[in-house]
Image: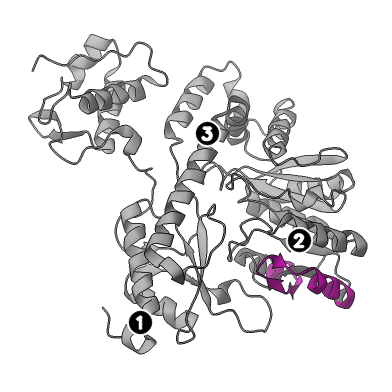
Amino acid sequence: MTMWSPVLNGRKGPAYLALADAIAEGVSTGVLRPRDRLPTQRSLAYELRLSLNTVSRAYAEATRRGFLEGEVGRGTFVRVTGWQPVEAQPARMARPLSGPIDFSLNLPFAGNAEAALAQTLESLSHSPVLSSYLHHDRNDDPRRHMDAGARWMGRLKLPDAGRSVILCNGAQHGLLVALLALLRPGDVLLVEALTYAPVKSMARHLGLSLRPVAMDDEGLKPEALDDACASTRAKVLYCLPTLHTPTAITMSEARRREIAHVVEKRGLTVIEDDVFGFLPVERPPPLACFAPHHAVFLTSVSKSIAPGLRVGYLQFPDRLRGALQAATNMSTWMSPPLMSEIVSRWIIDGTAERLNAEQRNEARARHDMARQVLGPRLPGGDRSGFHVWLPLPDRWDPDAFCAAARRRGVEVQPASVFAVGDGAAPNAIRLCLSHETSRDRVRQGLAIIADLFDGAPEDSSLIV
């Protein structure tokens, strides 16, 4: 072939990604054929007036995507088989591609944020005030970052009159801040009968008493909440109305209004955890819309955009600002300025919405895969989330099922991890479909779960 020479004019983003994209385009269109040898990195750097390091990074990126392979002493070649167009490449993340298939961790996909991050960091590197992101505090940015967070949450139609926003280091930190601000050792915290597992640990360390509130197939039962308030005089409720973990239930608007009525009647403050709230295309308004003077609304970008972005937001009635700000200062003082700046830019320029849509689409694709593999074993429900709830046949004990799955190389969580109180946990397990990088591994793990589901416990010990 005539020695290939890429054209980078008009391509956006860092030079190394532009060159990697040009390689991908050349392979996809047939300009670069299998076994074609690429120019040496040094000669291409000279031709394009790029640094050698930039070309090296581009070749490494194209190799990571599956387009190129190197041969020591011979050069870099287009792969003969196995390449895929860049659009079809699965998201890469620092998660194992071998070993046990992990359905136990409810982490989102890494997504395709790498290029956006590189572009944003490139832009930030030219900032005349770059060193200010290393300062302990900045006078101008916290307000701008809070405004960006309010804009992000505004997509959910949250009320803003008489309410304030604080930045936190992810939703889990925001939850800790709320518990520190609203409760004291010995107080009762009302929670759903099945709840976010770290809440149990937080309550234990903070000296709080958890009181489970009964649920049905719509989530919290209003009459059970009212009874719990009457019998405990509790003043704080923690709940997950949208894509509840572990059950994946999304509470209807009518049920939210009923819960809000009890909250207002009993003078409760509700901590509404909405970390999954940006995944559904359509969802009921937050509880905070129906009881704005009684709701602390909590969300983050870690579940909706990318897992490593540890930026969260608390929106709350103005009357709670002092207590929540003091708890934030005590626990972390401030959200890291550089990470907050990245997230704020992405919210403002539309990158956050694009990456959120990618998360939403991948979640739907994996949920559809679970439906295909598990069939009628999987109950109906919201298809928007990262996790599914699988009731087991009576012949299976959840702990025994999880042990059998582990022997087959699949990690899952039993209902007991999320259960609160002394009552028996439901006969069910939670499957998280988002942690695994490869869809093939997800499908393989689901097939193992389906096989175990249809088998008998005494047979599982014979499977290796």
Local SS, label 3: helix
Q: Is residue 376 left or right of residue 145?
A: left
Residue at 67% in and 84% down: 422
The amino acid type of the residue labelled 1 equals Gly
The crowding category of the residue bearing disc 2, from other C-alpha atoms within 10 Å (few below 14, some 14 to 19, many at least 20), is: some
**Residue highlighted by disc 3:** 354
Residue 212 drawn in magenta:
yes
Proximity of marks 3 and 2: CB atoms separated by less than 8 Å: no
- Image label count: 3
Q: Disc 2 designates what residue? A: 255
Of 262 and 50, nearer the camera is 262
Q: Amino acid at mark 3?
A: Arg
In the figure, residue 46 lies in which quadrant?
A: top left
Residue 97 visible in image? yes
The mark that comes first in sequence, 1 or 2, is 2
SS at mark 2 in the image: helix
Q: Give the residue at x 56% y 44%.
A: 304
Residue 329 in percent (x, y) is at 75, 46
Residue 47 drawn at (x, y percent): 22, 10
Image quarter in which the C terminus is found: bottom left
What numbered label is drawn on residue 455? 1
Q: Which residues are magenta?
A: 203-231
